[in-house]
Amino acid sequence: MIRRLIAERWLNLQAGRTLVDRRGGHPQHLLQDAPADLSERANRKKAIAQYLKQRHP
């Protein structure tokens, strides 16, 4: 019962924040060389495919 109350209280305190905010924001070292248009899925898929091709020829 106490765990449930704590969990409910925690969720209420955190309700206004996004998952990224709760986890501490985006890791900056991963975004340093990233293009600005990675918010669209197609662009992310292309970037990941290109990275994997470079990494594993």
Image (cartoon, helix red, strand yellow):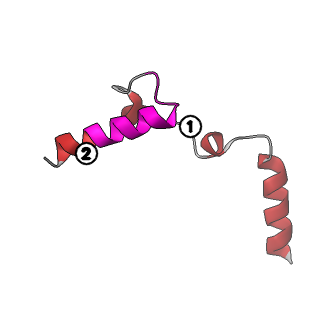
Disc sitting over residue 52 in the figure: 2
Determine the CA span between mark 2 and mark 1. 25 Å
38 lies above or below 55: above
Indicate the position of residue 38 as horizontal and vertical percent values. Answer: 46, 30
Marks 2 & 1, CB-CB < 8 Å contact: no
37 lies above or below 52: above
Comes first in the chain, label 2 or label 1: 1
Q: Residue at x 81, y 65 (%)?
A: 6
Residue 27 visible to an observer of this rendering: no
Indicate the position of residue 7 as horizontal and vertical percent values. Answer: 79, 64
- In which quadrant of the rendered view does residue 46 lie? top left
Extreme-top residue of the structure: 36
Q: Amino acid at mark 1?
A: Gly
Which span of residues is magenta-colored? 36-50
Extreme-left residue of the structure: 57
Q: Residue at x 34, y 41 (%)?
A: 48
48 lies above or below 1: above
Q: Is residue 22 left or right of residue 25?
A: right
Disc sitting over residue 25 in the figure: 1
Q: Is residue 39 magenta?
A: yes
Q: Amino acid at mark 2?
A: Leu
